[in-house]
Amino acid sequence: MIPTREQALNLLKQYNKEESHIHHALAVEAAMRHFAELYNEDPDLWGVAGILHDIDWEQTAQTPEKHCHVAPEMLRNAGVDETLIHSVQSHGYGICTDIEPSNNLEKTLFTIDELTGLIITAGLVRPSKSLSDLELKSVKKKWKDKAFARGVNREIIKQGAEKMNMPLDDVINETIIALRPVEKSIGM
């Protein structure tokens, strides 16, 4: 089964209670939906993948090497389709799994999971505390500052953009555009 958006959110909230994790899932969902439309793919499927990608995060926070390894059982118990489970696992490629992203959905999820955090943080440090006036050049400036958003793995984002066959600047810019309409629902 491919869950509806509502089913996916309910499933995510069954295992994740921290508001910041819900906000992250909503940010990734928005970016995934945006990129699905760019690729002429199913935005509902891509959005659900964005919502569910970190379903096991709170259960594996103390053992990050288990992230993406607990999720399959959670998703299978809910009857979620194996292709979606594979997508969730592949977003941790090279970090906590050896399951390589193999299609546009998986490559995009792999890339924008990290990127949404960088963009949101860049928006929050602006005087406006908003994405409405955030531009690519501002994100690129913050990108170079390794102390800024230290937890964001920039190498993963670069590798992901290559996997997507899209220039890094385009991936960043499209992600900014994707997040602007949802900034209130993601805690900005």
Image (cartoon, rainbow, N blue to C red):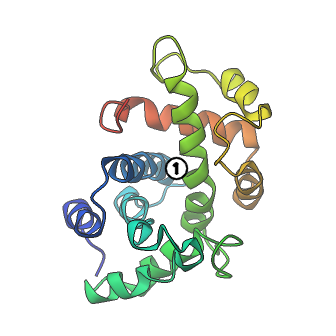
Query: x, y percentage for residue 69?
Result: 51, 83
Query: x, y percentage for residue 86?
Result: 51, 81
Asked if residue 180 is positioned above or below residue 49 in the image, the reply reads above
Q: Residue furthest top?
A: 127
Total count of labels: 1
Judge by depth and name the residue closer to the eye, 169 or 149.
149
Asked if residue 120 is positioned above or below residue 98 in the image, the reply reads above
Asked if residue 173 is positioned above or below residue 37 in the image, the reply reads above
Q: Residue furthest front?
A: 62
Query: x, y percentage for residue 106?
Result: 57, 68
Which residue is drawn at the image coordinates 54% and 79% (left, top)?
66
Left or right relative to 85: residue 91: right
Q: Residues within 10 Å of mark 1 (few under 14, many from 20)?
A: many
- Res 70 → quadrant: bottom left
Query: x, y percentage for residue 174?
Result: 58, 37
Judge by depth and name the residue closer to the eye, 118 or 37.
118
- Res 169 → quadrant: top right
Which residue is drawn at the image coordinates 51% and 32% (left, top)?
177
Judge by depth and name the residue closer to the eye, 115 or 95.
95
Q: Read off the residue under disc 1.
A: 35
What amino acid type should be assigned to the residue bearing mark 1? Phe
Which residue is drawn at the image coordinates 66% and 72% (left, top)?
93
Left or right relative to 102: residue 178: left
The N terminus sits in image quarter: bottom left
